[in-house]
Amino acid sequence: MKNKNKISYIYVFLACLLLELIIVPIRGINLELSELIAFVAYSLFIYFCCKFFRKLNPLLILGFTFLAWFLLNLPVRLFYWKDALITLWEVLMHVLGMITGYLLWVNKRIWKFVTLLVATIVCVVYAANNIKWLDYLSFGKVDSEGEQVLEEDFCLRDLNGSELSLNDFKDKYLVLDFWSSSCGLCIKSFPEVQSFSEKFSNNQRVSFYSVFCVSAKRCETRQTGFDIVQKRGFSFPLLFSEDESYKKFGVSCFPTVVIFSPDNKIIFRGRLEIAIKFINKNINK
């Protein structure tokens, strides 16, 4: 390998590092969008690298691109393996994007068309199944409906520290929206939570509460959650989960909505938008 070519491969490597650093922040805005952008971006990156560095081996360009991406992502995925599973589709979209760019460069015209067709099908399949994958990892199943009896009564508190349990909501459907201060998506969904709360505020069959999960590691108190909501101008009713009591509800990620039936069984666990559909279909008839 000539020195000039070695330098060119280093340029490809560094350019890929920069590309990944540009894509990463988009995850915080919209995970699905960032994955589709990554697919297109890596396809174009590989293709134009091959076009610009014509003297380089396209397969080595693909290899150096993957190496740069791999080195940036490996530490996080090793140390946070369980949490990283939620972005498995992201990994596939990145790698498939790289392969697509490579195939577009090395193949003849008819195969370029086939490559683009397959890439389009992959994107469609991704769009159709990514939410199901997230639901499966987050809630243990794709279908959020079902019945579950708690082994023991739960204990949540109001701002003053008074305890509330299932017996306080007898003969009513209880809807609990669990969230955390570290969850940007939770805070982003506050307008929907407020709307949901107002819709059922006068409903005699349904009680709704947003549940702030207090984190001792972040030195939080019940006041922390109250201040987060109040400073943003929202007024939905709040309860508080302390000492990780939210785990009794099967909550493993945020946000998660849990719905109890009047006979104190969990009949739903999932995302807020699906919970609204569930209530409209089964409760608010």
Image (tube, grey):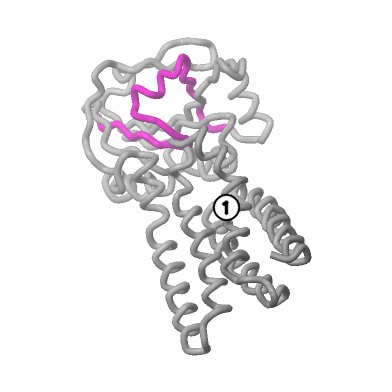
- According to the picture, the residue beneath numbered tag 1 turns out to be 30
Rate crowding at label 1 as few (under 14), some (14 to 19) or many (20 or more) other CA atoms within 10 Å. Answer: few
Residue drawn at (57%, 52%) of the image: 30
Magenta region includes residue 156: no
Disc 1 marks a residue whose amino acid type is Asn
Locate residue 85, reporting x and y percent.
43, 43
Residue drawn at (47%, 16%) of the image: 242
Q: Which residues are magenta?
A: 235-262
Magenta region includes residue 261: yes
User: Hey, which quadrant is residue 205 in on the image?
Assistant: top left
- Position of the N terminus, as image quadrant, is bottom right
* 106 lies above or below 16: below
Locate residue 64, reporting x and y percent.
62, 58
Residue drawn at (47%, 78%) of the image: 115
Check the image and name the residue furthest to the front.
1
* 168 lies above or below 65: above
Locate residue 229, reporting x and y percent.
61, 30
Locate residue 29, reporting x and y percent.
62, 50
- Element under disc 1: loop
* 261 lies above or below 6: above
Q: Nearer the viewer, residue 98 or 8?
A: 8
Residue drawn at (56%, 38%) of the image: 76
Q: Nearer the viewer, residue 217 or 154?
A: 217
